[in-house]
Amino acid sequence: MRKEEMERLAQDAGFTNMGVIPADHLVFEPSLRKYCEDNLCGNFGKNLSCPPACGTPEDMKKRTEAYETAWIFQTIAEVDWHDAKALKAVRDSHNARSRKLLNRLREEGTAGLAMLAGPCAACEICAGAEGKPCRFPEQQISCISAYCMSAEKMAEEAGLPYWCGEGRVGFFSLYLTGRKEG
């Protein structure tokens, strides 16, 4: 897909910014896994798209190595950083727009690997919380954090803001495309 076409789709979907970089420019930092293990979001061991069920940092990086292009979608919103409910609402809205765009791209034949801002929420309660397999594996999407990817370095590489200023937050999602041969 051409950059101009993806920019139009991203703008139509309501994203603030869109960037594109070679997928091999994404930076992985396995030490970031500790944030998942600290379970601040409450999904460690309860969501199949999250650690430990999603795989090791090495497993996650290996999945990305099959792709050539990283399309980055960003939502910037004004929100009180101390208001967890408002932050979650912005993140959920960003992820809903991301899923809608990803579904459209897939329907048009653009296959790829998706990543969201925060844990998969395709189901109200993940089957993993009940020790069961995923009910909708085609909708299961891990977050950038589960991949141990540096969102800050990704944003910098793409020329997108990471720190958006006081009272503003930025959320990212990705879609890796262009499956490598071999």
Image (cartoon, helix red, strand yellow):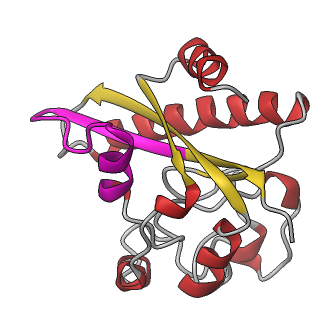
Q: Is residue 77 above or below residue 25?
A: above
Q: Quadrant of the N terminus?
A: top right
Residue 166 located within the stretch drawn in magenta: yes
79 relative to 181 in the view: left or right: left
- Does residue 28 belong to the magenta stretch? no
In the picture, measured across the screen, residue 103 lies left or right of residue 151, that is right
161 vs 97, left or right, is left
Say if 178 sits above or below 67 in the image: above
Residue 53 position within the rendered picture, expressed as x and y whole percent measured from the top left: 68, 82
Q: Is residue 127 visible?
A: yes
- Residue pictured at 59% horizontal, 72% vertical: 50
- Front residue of 31 and 7: 7
Q: Which portion, as a residue range, is magenta?
A: 152-173
- Residue at (53, 71) in percent of width and height: 146
Q: Residue at the location (56% across, 20% down)?
A: 7
Could you tell me which quadrant the C terminus lies in?
A: bottom right
Q: Residue at x 51, y 34 (%)?
A: 94
